[in-house]
Image (cartoon, rainbow, N blue to C red):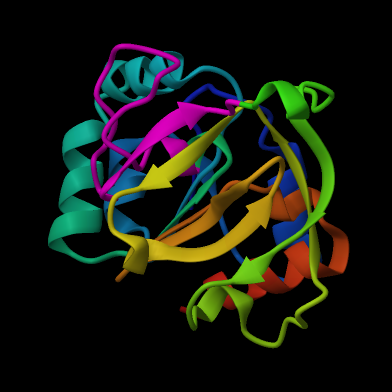
């Protein structure tokens, strides 16, 4: 199930899931969420807006129950990955707090001032540990990014992959049934298709 909490366009994710033959629904209905065996938390936009919408739709309690209690696999994408953390420099609201991390803005030295924010475009990633999301992907896999903030993990064991933009940052996290990717698999062609296939098989 794709959680439709009013932040971002779900069309690209829906199209990619259809392309790889995955059955899914997009909804903010609590009864649908209760029945879901896997969850995708997408999102573009601001951290506080995302958390406000989740709370306003009455999704926070059921999400905690599904993910923390029932251990339902969840994949956070872009803003969705950032919402997995305790909070963000972008706002003041607490995040979901499922990953031991905070979301911070890219900070570059004077020597790196030519680097633009947001980080936008294709980038290679490096795998930090074995993670089911990257099964059957080659080391040269490339993914599409659009973001101004990144996740800073306190527990390095939760970093599944890194990318480099001025400096190394976590671009994928994993803690048990909880997965997050900063890049957009739905816009990353065959590499992103494989990530979504791998998650659907969890």
> Which residue is depicted at the point 50% across and 33% down?
4
> Which residue is depicted at the point 48% across and 78% down?
129
Q: Nearer the viewer, residue 23 or 48?
A: 48
Instruction: Determine whether, in the image, residue 193 is placed left or right of residue 103.
Output: right
Q: Nearer the viewer, residue 8 or 154?
A: 154
Q: Is residue 23 above or below residue 85?
A: below
**Residue closest to the far bottom:** 136
Is 84 within the magenta? yes
Magenta: main secondary structure equals loop
Instruction: Determine whether, in the image, residue 156 is placed left or right of residue 67.
Output: right
Q: Is residue 23 above or below residue 198?
A: above
Q: Nearer the viewer, residue 170 or 137?
A: 170
> Which residue is depicted at the point 28% across and 58% down?
155
The residues colored magenta run 81-107
Q: Is residue 51 above or below residue 144?
A: above
> Which residue is depicted at the point 65% across and 74% down?
197
**Where's residue 116, x and y in %?**
79, 23
Instruction: Determine whether, in the image, residue 155 is placed left or right of residue 6.
Output: left
**Residue closest to the far front:** 111
Residue 73 shows in this picture = no
Q: Nearer the viewer, residue 14 or 145?
A: 145
**Where's residue 174, x and y in %?**
40, 65
The number of discs equals 0
**Where's residue 119, x and y in %?**
74, 33
């Amino acid at each position: 199930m794709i959680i439709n909490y009013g932040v971002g366009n779900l069309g690209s994710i829906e199209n990619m899931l259809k392309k790889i033959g995955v059955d899914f629904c997009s909804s903010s209905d609590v009864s649908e969420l209760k029945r879901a065996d896997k969850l995708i938390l997408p999102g573009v936009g601001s951290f506080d807006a995302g958390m406000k919408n989740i709370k306003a739709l009455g999704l926070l309690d059921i999400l905690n129950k599904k993910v923390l209690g029932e251990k339902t696999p969840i994949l956070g994408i872009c803003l969705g990955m950032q919402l997995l953390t305790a909070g963000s420099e972008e706002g003041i609201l607490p995040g979901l707090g499922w990953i031991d991390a905070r979301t911070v803005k890219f900070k570059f030295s004077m020597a790196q001032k030519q680097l633009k924010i947001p980080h936008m475009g294709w980038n290679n990633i490096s795998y930090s540990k074995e993670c089911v999301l990257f099964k059957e992907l080659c080391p040269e896999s490339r993914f599409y990014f659009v973001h101004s903030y990144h996740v800073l993990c306190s527990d390095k064991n939760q970093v599944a992959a890194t990318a480099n933009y001025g400096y190394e940052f976590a671009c994928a996290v994993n803690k048990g049934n909880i997965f997050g990717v900063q890049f957009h698999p739905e816009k990353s062609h065959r590499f992103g298709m494989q990530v979504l296939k791998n998650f659907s098989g969890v």
